[in-house]
Each structure stands twice: as C-alpha cells, then as structure tokens.
Amino acid sequence: MKELDIIYLLVTAIVVSKIIIGFLIVYLVKRRRELSREKAKLYQSNVALEAHIVKIEEQQQEIVDSENFKLKILSLASHDLRTPFQELVMLFDYADVSDLSDSEFKKLMQTIRKQLKISKNMLDNVLVWTAGQLKNKEYGKSAIALAEQINLTVDLFATQTAAKQINVINNVPDGVSIIGNAEVFNFVIRNLLSNAIKYSPVASAVEIGADESEVGVRCIYIQDAGQGIDENTLITLRSGQLIQSTLGTDQEKGVGLGLSLCRDLLKRVGWSLEIESEWGKGSRFSLFFVAEKPNHVLQFADRPQTGTLN
C-alpha cells in the first residue's frame, strides 16, 4: 500500500509539475510576445524621437541660417545705400565748381539731377526689398526687360566709371526679357558690375552680354579685364565660402559679402552663378536662370565648362 501511495504521489507530482511547466511555458511565451510588442513600440518611439530631434536640429539650423541671411541682407543693403552718395561725392570731387563756366555748371546740375533720380529709385527699391527679405517675403515673379534693367544699373555707376575711364558696354539685345524676380536680378547685376568696376584698371572696358546654354536657360555675363582671381580664391568662391575682401585697383573697399549673398539669393530662386577667371587676365561672371515663357530666343555659341555656385 505504501508503494502504491508513493507511486500515486510521484505520478501526481509529475502531472502537477507538467501542468506548472505548461503554465510557465504559456506565461513565458505570452510574456515574450508582450516584450516583443513593447520592444517594437520602444523602437518606434526611439525612431520618432530621433526624427523629432533631427527636425528640431533642422529648425534650429534654419533659424541660424535665416539670421545669418538677414545679417548679410543688412550688410549689403548698407553697402547699396552708400553707393548713390559715393557717386554724388565723386561727382563733386571730380568737378571743381568754382572753375566751371555757366554752361558747364548747368550740365553738372543736369547730371546731378539725373543721378539723384536714379539714386532715389534705387534707394526705394533697396529699402522695400530689404524689408521684404527680413520678413521672409515670397519671391514674386514678373517680366524683366534685361537690357533696360542693365542700363539703369550702368547709369548708377556712371560717375565711378567716368573717374576710372572705364567703358561699360551693354551688348544685351533690346527686347529680350525673362520671367523672374526683378529684385534678385537687379541686386546680383548691381553687385557683379560693382566688383567688375572695382577690380578693373583705369582706361579699360567691362562687357555685359547675353548667352544661351540650352533650351529654356538664359545667361547674362559680366566680363572685365581686371587682375583676375587666383586659383585658390576661385576654389573658395565656387565652394560658397566667405572670402576676405581685397582693395580695388583704385583702393576701393568692400565688405566681402557680395558674392556670398548673391549665391544665397540665386539658390532661393533656382538660379546659379558661374565664375571663369585667370590671374592677370580678368574675370567673367555668368548669371544663369531658367526662363519661363521667353519671348525671344537667343542664338549664341556654346559656353565653356566652368565651376558653378548654386
């Protein structure tokens, strides 16, 4: 009897242990599934957190870039606002009023009146445009009469070019227009022409012309016969980095931000800037932009391969 009791006890113990093991196995499987689900949720949370962190970092970088861009805008706006006054100062320095005849004095007053009108329009545009940039205003599009706008910019620097005996030749055909942002176009052309005059020697020429690269892409270039850009500086310019401003051929000063801001602006409107230069042989800056519904097709030779700022 005792042996049977022992056997029953062993059997009962084995059955109970199996039941317990079965429950444990079921529990462990269930727990494992729960842990897997929790792990998946935790992984998804980590992914979402990382994405959120990346987004925050991108937003912070956008804020930093926006603030840096605004600082550039203010710096270049101050440079543009000085240009008309520099022109007038040079105009008075260029002519000794006390030695002028009546006809010469009247001619000088007419020149000053014309310069003031050009300067006022330019100042109005710069102030309105700068305010828009600081408010992150959208870049509107309108028809841009290229030759007309370039002539207005050339007139703005008339006194400087006369003082250095620089002949600015506008070879852009009349009637050629594009659809784009006029303020960005004028700002870039103004800065490129300013640099061309700054680094051109006395009694030289600056050429402004139009070129066609491919269907729908237009190019305006400004070419000077100045000192050119050395290879290392050219690489730095093409990479979009800031460079230290150097004195012009007549000791003109600059802020060193012009090309950098031009690059930023062109990138925002989908345009680009290419630079060709060789030390001692002058430089050529080409503004490329995609024209929308152009009313005139240019026929020019293919342009050489160059570095692009975009």
Image (cartoon, rainbow, N blue to C red):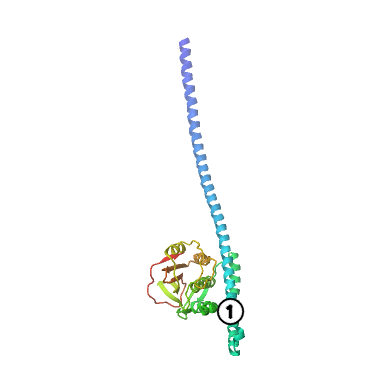
Q: Position of residue 94 (x, y in %)?
A: 56, 80
Image x and y of residue 199, in percent: 48, 72
Question: In this picture, which residue range is highlighted in magenta?
Answer: 87-93
Residue that sits furthest to the front in the current view: 99
Magenta region, mostly helix, strand or loop? helix
Query: In which image quadrant can residue 218 be found?
Result: bottom left
Taking the image as shown, residue 93 lies to the left or right of residue 172, namely: right
Q: How many marks?
A: 1
**Residue 108 appears in the figure:** yes
Residue 1 in sight here: no
**Which is more toward the observer, 9 or 122?**
122
Residue drawn at x 59%, y 85% is: 108
Q: Which residue is labeled 1 in the image? A: 93
Looking at the image, residue 252 lies above or below residue 117: above
The image shows residue 116 at horizontal and vertical percentages of 60, 79
Q: Secondary structure at mark 1?
A: helix
Front-most of 282 and 202? 202
The answer to whether residue 137 is above or below residue 97 is above
Query: Looking at this rendering, what residue extends furthest in the top direction?
Result: 1
Left or right side of 171 for 53: right
Magenta stretch contains residue 92: yes
| On screen, residue 208 above or below 239 | below
Q: Residue at x 49, y 38 (%)?
A: 36
- Picture residue at 48% right of the left edge, 26% below the top: 21
Q: Amino acid at mark 1?
A: Asp
Instruction: Please tell me which residue lies in front, 271 or 21.
Output: 271
